[in-house]
């Protein structure tokens, strides 16, 4: 207990899936958690209660990280409510999969906005705070797909590859101020979304992974804890692959 004790983290897109797993593990490690969600008020309230029971301060904010002004307002609201921000986890993301020949411009634009522009918005919004305190940790969620590509996901792959280039550049710009920026690239993580897939498809995916299982949100959350804590104080501009050996 306590690798993140006394720290405050913003986690975007945390009412379910990987984001929720990160919020739960962060709270268990002593972090105060400000999280964003897009639609599910009930899920957000439930998570607030669950995290608070771990003895930390927790609050959900209905905020769209893909909107520049909302991102600016969110950071100010969190500063007002929590008094400090030490960690930013950019996790919000969507998919709108299709072959390129069938992909609409709207489906391309929305995935880029939610997955990539949101990282710019949130990093820009938090930068002044981190520069003033001369410290901060940013962890951005990419994907194995952003590294190796995937048929039917040109929009998603482009957004997740863009996150890697953006993060490496931020690491170079802000490193002299003791602000670190790293990337996690998850592989096949089993969440509520993947539970809707048929068992045969999931088994095929598992069989193709050297560790012979899908990852869990906790697998990603534990990596986030490491990259957000003082244990990784000399690590910046890196991509940590958490994929069971899918990509070596």
Image (spheres, helix red, strand yellow):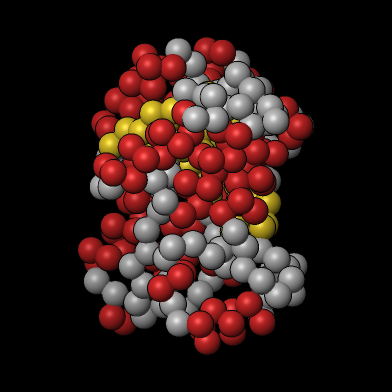
x 41%, y 73%: residue: 196
Q: Residue at (36%, 33%) from the top-left corner?
A: 60
Give me the residue at 28% from left, 37% from top: 62
Q: Can residue 161 be seen in the rendering of this structure?
A: no
Farthest front residue in view? 53
Which residue is rendered at x = 33% and y = 51% of the image? 113
- For residue 142, above or below residue 76: below
Is residue 6 rendered to the left or right of residue 91?
right
Can you give x and y, in whole percent of width and height, for residue 168 in the image? 60, 43
67 above or below 229? below
Quarter of the image where one finds residue 143: bottom right
Q: Pick the residue in front: 196 or 130.
A: 196
Task: Name the image quarter holding residue 243.
Answer: bottom right
Front position in the image: 238 or 30:
30
User: Is 87 left or right of 194, judged from the image as shown?
Assistant: right
Q: Is residue 215 above or below residue 113?
A: below
Q: Residue 17 at x, y = what percent?
A: 46, 54
Quarter the N terminus occupies: top right
Q: Position of residue 136 (x, y in %)?
A: 59, 25
Q: From the image, which quarter does the C terminus lie in?
A: bottom right
Q: Is residue 96 left or right of residue 210?
A: left
Task: Name the foreground residue: 186 vs 31.
Answer: 31
- Which residue is nearer to you in this view: 39 or 68? 39
Q: How many marks?
A: 0
**Residue 204 seen in this snapshot:** yes
Above or below, comparing residue 187 to residue 20 in the picture: below
Q: Is residue 226 left or right of residue 123?
A: right
Q: Looking at the picture, how far across and down is residue 150, in whole percent?
A: 51, 74
């Amino acid at each position: 207990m306590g690798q993140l004790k006394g720290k405050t983290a913003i986690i975007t897109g945390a009412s379910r899936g990987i984001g929720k797993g990160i919020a739960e593990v962060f709270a268990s490690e002593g972090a105060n958690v400000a999280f964003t969600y897009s639609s599910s008020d009930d899920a957000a309230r439930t998570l607030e209660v669950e995290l608070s029971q771990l003895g930390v301060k927790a609050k959900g904010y209905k905020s769209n990280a893909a909107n520049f002004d909302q991102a600016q307002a969110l950071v100010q609201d969190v500063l007002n409510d929590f008094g400090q921000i030490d960690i930013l986890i950019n996790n919000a993301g969507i998919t709108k999969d299709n072959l390129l020949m069938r992909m609409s411009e709207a489906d391309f634009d929305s995935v880029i906005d939610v997955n990539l522009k949101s990282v710019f918005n949130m990093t820009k919004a938090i930068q002044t705070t981190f520069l003033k305190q001369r410290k901060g940790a940013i962890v951005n969620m990419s994907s194995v797909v952003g590294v190796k590509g995937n048929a039917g996901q040109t929009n998603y792959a482009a957004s997740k590859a863009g996150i890697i280039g953006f993060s490496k550049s931020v690491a170079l710009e802000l490193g002299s101020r003791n602000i670190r920026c790293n990337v996690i690239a998850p592989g096949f993580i089993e969440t509520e979304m993947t539970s809707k897939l048929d068992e045969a498809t999931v088994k095929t995916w598992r069989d193709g992974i050297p560790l012979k299982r899908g990852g869990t949100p906790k697998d990603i959350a534990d990596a986030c804890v490491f990259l957000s804590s003082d244990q990784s104080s000399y690590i910046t501009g890196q991509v940590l692959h958490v994929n069971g050996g899918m990509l070596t």
